[in-house]
Image: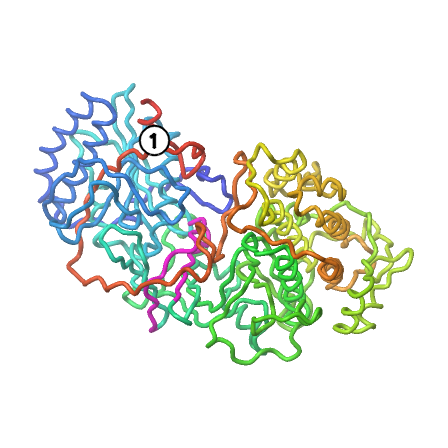
Amino acid sequence: MSPPLLPPNNSPTTHVIEVANFEHVHLSPPPNRSSSIVDMEDHQLEYQAIAYSFGPDELRDCIVHYLNKISESIYSTFKCLKELLPLAHHPNKRVVDQPQIIGVYRKERSQDWSKHTVPWHRVETVVQVIGKKEDFQEHLVYTKHLLQARPDCPGVYGVSVLHNEIENEVQYRILWADAAGIVLSEWYPLERQVLPLPLFALVYSFYAPPNKHHLKDPTIRWTEAKFLSRARWTVKCHKREYPGCHILCAADPFDRRTMVFYYYKGDDLCVIKDAFWDPNNTQQEASVLNTIHKQGILPGVVRLQDHESVLDCNRRRIVTAASESLGISARIRNRMVLTSVGRKLTTADSIKDLLMAIYDIIEAHRSLCMDRSILHRDMSMNNILIYPQHDPASEKRFTKNPPKFISDVVRDKCKDSDRSRGLIIDFDNSASLLDKERRYKADQDLTCCVGTPIFIPRSAAITAPLDVKCFTPMPQLTGLAKSLYVQAYSQQSYDLYADSEGRCHSVPDTLKTKDQCSEYAHRPDHDVESIFWSLIYVLLQLQPLDGEDSNVSGLSEDALLAWKHLHGHRVEAATKTSVSIDTRDVLFEFCAGDWKKALHPGLSSLAPLLAKMSLQVWPEYGLLAESPPREHLHEAMRRLLLQHIVDMDDPILLNPRNRRPVPRNVDHVTNVTGVDVDGARFGWLHLPHPKEQPEGEKPKIILRVPAPKRRREGDENAGGPPDKRQKSS
C-alpha cells in the first residue's frame, strides 16, 4: 500500500490512497473473458502501431477506440465516435475546463447527439491521457467535477493513461471515487502481448458493479424537456417524489458531499439536502432539527419536513465503498426535506434590512444555546440567510415564549409568521451542550476544530485560547433605544450588565492564573464572532442603490487590505513551539476612520458600528477567572445593533444586482444553500413539470472526446487545470 497522495484541493478531509488489491475489491471480474481475446489481440496490434508512431492526440483517439472495442466485446457493437464535443451545464458555472475523454451512455443508437455539447449530467466516467505521473492530479480535479455534476451517482470510476515518450511505454491506472475519498489501482502496463484484464473488469463493472459500489441512486433521476438541455432532477424521499428540482449547491464531493436541490410549485416549496453522514463522528442533522423543534417551532431556524437514509434497489443503505480501503468509517447517504428557504445576505434590499436580519439571527442563536442547548459551530455567511420564507403547511405550533426579535422590540410590522427576519440553516457541525444526564458537557467534549475558513472563530482555527486580554465593558443604550429595550426585555435584564470599573460583561475582569487556563473549547460567543466576520464579508461587497459601478482598481487601500487578510486566513493549529498568527487580527486594529475608507462611501455611517463591534469580539473571554453568562456577547452585539437601527435616519437602499467587486487574486467562498444562485432570486423560480422519461433497456456505454473549450479572459484559475493542447497552440 502506497502512502496517501496529496488531494487536488489540498483539503485535509480528502483521502486519496493507492491499494494493491484494487482489481479484486473495486472491480467485477467479467464473464467469458476468453471469448473477447481474439478481437482484442487484433486491435492491440493496431493500437501499439498508432500509439508509437504519432503524437499524444493520436494516442488519445486510440484510447477511445481501444476502450470502445472492449465495450463491444462485453455489451454490443457500436461506432467509435471521433468528433470533438465540448461539455456543458455543470452546476458550478466556474468550471470551464474539461477532461480529454469521457464515457457516456446511449439508450438508443439512433439518438441524435448534438454536434456542439454534451451535458455534464450525461457523463459516466472520465479518462485522462497524461505525460508524467505528476499530472495525475488533473484527473482528480475532473473526477471532483464529475461527482458534483452527478448527484445520482454515489460513486464513479475513472482511468488515467500515462504515455512516457522517453521510455516508449504506456501505462494506465483505474480509480474509484465516492464521498469517502479516492482509491487508486497500481499502474498497469499496456503491452502488446498482455491482455488488459483490469480494463475488461472496469467496463463490465459499469453493468455489474461489485458489492457496495453504487453507481446509481434509484431515488434521483434527471428529467429534461429536451435531450441535451440543462438537467432537472426528480428526487424521492420516502414515497413522495419532487419533480423539476434544480441544483442549488454542489459542495466539495469528498467527506460529506452535500448536494442541495430546490423544489417550487405554487405554494409548495422546499429544499432537499443530501449528505453522506459519518455516524461515528457527527450527529445527524435531522435529529438535531427534531430536537430544536420538539417543543414547538423555534422561529429563525430552518424547518424539517421529512428525512430518511437513502436505500438502493435492494433496500440496502447507500454507503461509501472507498471507506474500507481507506481505513475510515463508511459514510451513509441521508436525505432531508426542509421547508424553509431564504436569500444570501448580499441580496439585502437595504442596510436596515440587513442589520435587522443580523439582530434576529443573533437572537435565534441565543435561543438555540440557552433554550435548546444546541451550539451551531459554523455560523458562516453561507449558513445565515435573509428574507426567510416557509411552506405554510409547516406552520403548526410555535414554541412557548419565543425569542423577541427586532420587529417585537421596535414594534415594526413583519410579514413573516414567525417574526424572524433571518434564518439559520445547516446544522451539520452542531453539538449539544448537554450530556446524556442533561448536564452541561465538560469543555473537553467541544475541543475539535470546526468551521468555515474566513468565518471560523480565531481560537477555533488554532484550537487554543487567544492571548488577548483587553476587555471592553458592555455597551450602554441611550434615548429611544434604551426605552424600547426595557419595554421588550425588562429593566432587570438591562441592569444585569451594568459594568462598573473593574468589571466586564457582569463579571470581574480578573484573569485566570496560568495553571487555571484550560484548553480551547467552543463556546456560544465563538459563534457570535463568526457572525461578525460574516457581516464584514457582506458589507465590503455592498453599495447603495444610486452608487456608481466600481472595479477592483477603484477599491481603497483599506478595502484591499481587508480582503487580503480575510482571504489570507488559514486554519492552522498552534503548537508548543510556535504561535499561529491569524491574519484577520489586523482588522481589529481598524478604527472607525479605517472602516470608513474600506466601505463604500455611501455606507460610511456603519464605520463606528463595526469599530465598536470589533472591541467586543476581540478579547478572549475564556481567560476571565469568572466566566460571564453564556449569552454575554449576544447581548453586547444586539445592543449595538439596536442602537444603530433606532438611530438610522436613512435605511440606505442597496443594489443587490450590482455589488462591489472582490479582488480576483483571492478565492471566492461558495454559497451552500442560499436560493440566490447564479443571479436568480427567490420568486423567479417557477419550474415546469417535465415529462417522465420512459424506462428503456439497459443503456450502452460509449466513450467520447470533448472538444477544447475556449477559455474566457480572467478564468485562468477557474474550474481546473487548463487544456494542454490549448497551451501549446
For badge 1, the amino acid type reads Asp
Tell me which residue sits at (8%, 38%) in the image: 39
Q: Nearer the viewer, residue 35 or 264?
A: 264
Q: Nearer the viewer, residue 444 or 594?
A: 594
- Residue 682, how many percent across, how many down? 46, 60
Mainly helix, strand or loop, the magenta region?
strand
Magenta stretch: includes residue 251: yes
The relative height of residue 439 versus residue 228 in the rendered view (above or below) is below
The relative height of residue 706 versus residue 542 in the rendered view (above or below) is above
- Residue 220, how many percent across, how many down? 32, 61
The relative height of residue 479 versus residue 151 in the rendered view (above or below) is below
Residue position for label 1:
723
- Residue 312, how many percent across, how many down? 31, 64
Q: Indicate left or right for 709 with 287 as reference.
A: left
Q: Quadrant of the C terminus?
A: top left
Q: Indicate left or right for 684 with 439 as reference.
A: left
Q: Nearer the viewer, residue 354 or 673?
A: 354
Tell me which residue sits at (28%, 45%) in the image: 125
Asked if one can make out residue 502 in the rendered structure from this viewpoint, the answer is yes
> In this view, which residue lies farthest toward the right?
501
The boundaries of the magenta stretch are 239-264
